[in-house]
Image: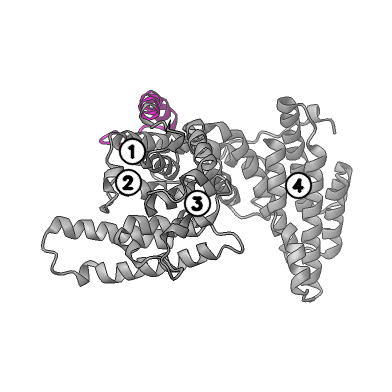
């Protein structure tokens, strides 16, 4: 079937379920419909973004030594945690590139644990191969980390965060993780409000509770093991409210500007996500597969991954396409798991996908035929869009990815229906493909 001749049925639109997070309150602003609210916030957002970019501190060089104020590193960390770092990519890359190129020059300097840990984590997050021996200066004569490091809870939290960016064979980071996590847990146990009844000042008690909650959250949800987009609201609520010796770093003039920008950005992105999910839900109802064999809100589940990993309005198309692809991964997995599906039918469906022959659809059961035809049209539509934007044909790569996936699904189905228990090696080898991750990544690269 020629790509240009692909057509889609247009049944009546069916409204999607209510979705995603509640907007973050911006003073007393009343909620407006999605489209008008997004338009209204746009002007305020542009102004706050301009102010934030003006506030972004630019590092300088002094006497041949790179002089990046720790405030700049704190601000980079803040904009990343607030989910607005995509507005500052050039600034962030410039700072971190210089930090990495001069890391050896700065080794052995008078920088504290907080700054070294934060700098290390930010560089590792951006895939810079900074060595872990930068923490060697914090060890005593016995080769163990100095117990006096525990005087600064903020530094210890950052030390713990940095230690999680470990690679095989890095004993220093393994020791750092054990040392920092043990210290932080001990700190929580000895400083909980219930054990500090002598704190008579209500403000101090509240600050102590806030800090304890922050430390506990760091242990439970460190950056390395969290989805940044889903942690924005929690971080925003506590932004600038920490009470350690590094508190001064979070109380510069830019804090309120960043908070306001993050709230506006969050709500504008939420409005965009709602529009995207409406678009995906409309598509899902048009292909009309959920009624027969799919889960009712499969497209919502499929949208969560691209929504949480691809930030910013520039990735809107990719989020929508990846949600559609992921929906089909779930759907076809369900087809192979349906008890009523025979191995002969599943084999025929696999052959139709591997041959990528639309004529074979006539030989399939109705629910398989509808699924294959919808998949065929979707892939060709994505391929057509990619060719129009980038000038190359991605159909072959996409088709090959789907072939490998359904073949892996068929292997799983044969094991299950024949009562065969595969070896762990065989199961893992097939599972690498049957998870669908390879297909989603290939699709993302083709679409990008």
Location of residue 263 in the rendering, given as x and y in whole percent from the top left corner? 36, 37
Front-most of 366 and 277?
277
Label 1–label 2 contact, CB within 8 A: yes
Location of residue 108 in the rendering, given as x and y in whole percent from the top left corner? 44, 51
- Element under label 1? helix
The segment highlighted magenta reads: 26-53
Q: Mark 2 points at which residue?
A: 239
Q: Of marks 2 and 3, which one's residue comes earlier in the chain? A: 3
Q: Of marks 1 and 4, which one's residue comes earlier in the chain? A: 1
Q: Of marks 1 and 2, which one's residue comes earlier in the chain? A: 2
Q: Name the residue under label 1.
A: 259
Label 3 vs label 4: CA separation? 35 Å
* Side of 4 where 229 appears, left or right: left
- Residue placed at 51% from the left, 37% from the top? 98
Label 4–label 2 contact, CB within 8 A: no
- Residue placed at 41% from the left, 60% from the top? 138
Label 3–label 4 contact, CB within 8 A: no
Q: Name the residue under label 3.
A: 227
Q: Mark 4 points at which residue?
A: 370
Location of residue 146 in the rendering, given as x and y in whole percent from the top left corner? 38, 65
Between label 3 and label 4, give the one nearer the viewer.
3
Quick one: which residue is furthest to the left in this view? 200
**Residue 102 visible in rendering:** yes
């Amino acid at each position: 079937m020629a790509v240009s001749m692909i057509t889609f049925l247009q049944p009546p639109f069916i409204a999607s379920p209510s979705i995603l997070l509640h907007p973050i309150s911006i003073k007393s602003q009343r909620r407006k419909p999605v489209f008008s609210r997004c338009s209204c916030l746009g002007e305020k957002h542009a102004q706050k973004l301009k102010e934030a970019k003006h506030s972004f501190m630019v590092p300088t060089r002094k006497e041949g030594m790179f002089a990046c104020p720790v405030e700049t590193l704190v601000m980079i960390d803040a904009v990343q945690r607030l989910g607005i770092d995509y507005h500052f990519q050039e600034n962030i890359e410039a700072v971190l590139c210089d930090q990495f190129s001069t890391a050896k020059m700065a080794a052995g300097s008078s920088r504290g644990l907080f700054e070294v840990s934060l700098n290390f984590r930010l560089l590792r997050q951006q895939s810079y191969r900074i060595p872990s021996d930068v923490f060697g200066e914090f060890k005593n004569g016995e080769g163990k980390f100095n117990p006096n490091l525990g005087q600064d809870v903020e530094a210890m939290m950052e030390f713990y965060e940095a230690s999680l960016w470990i690679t095989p064979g890095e004993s220093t980071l393994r020791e750092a993780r054990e040392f920092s996590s043990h210290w932080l847990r001990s700190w929580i146990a000895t400083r909980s409000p219930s054990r500090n009844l002598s704190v008579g000042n209500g403000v101090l008690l509240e600050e102590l509770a806030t800090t304890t909650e922050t430390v506990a959250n760091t242990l439970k949800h460190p950056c390395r093991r969290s989805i940044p987009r889903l942690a924005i609201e929690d971080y925003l609520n506590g932004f600038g409210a920490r009470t350690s010796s590094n508190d001064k770093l979070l109380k510069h003039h830019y804090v309120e500007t960043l908070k306001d920008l993050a709230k506006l950005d969050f709500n504008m992105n939420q409005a965009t996500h709602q529009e995207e999910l409406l678009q995906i839900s409309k598509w899902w109802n048009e292909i009309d597969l959920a009624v027969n064999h799919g889960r009712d809100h499969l497209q919502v589940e499929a949208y969560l991954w691209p929504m949480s990993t691809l930030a910013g309005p520039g990735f809107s198309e990719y989020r929508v396409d990846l949600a559609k692809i992921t929906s089909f991964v779930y759907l076809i997995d369900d087809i192979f798991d349906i008890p009523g599906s025979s191995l002969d039918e599943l084999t025929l469906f696999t052959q139709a996908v591997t041959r990528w022959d639309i004529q074979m659809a006539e030989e399939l059961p109705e629910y398989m035929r509808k699924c294959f035809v919808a998949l065929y049209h979707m892939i060709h539509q994505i391929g057509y869009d990619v060719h129009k934007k980038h000038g190359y044909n991605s159909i072959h790569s996409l088709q090959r990815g789907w072939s490998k996936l359904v073949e892996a699904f068929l292997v799983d189905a044969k094991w299950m229906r024949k009562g065969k228990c595969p070896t762990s090696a065989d199961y893992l080898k097939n599972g690498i493909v049957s998870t669908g991750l390879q297909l989603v990544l290939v699709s993302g690269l083709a679409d990008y």
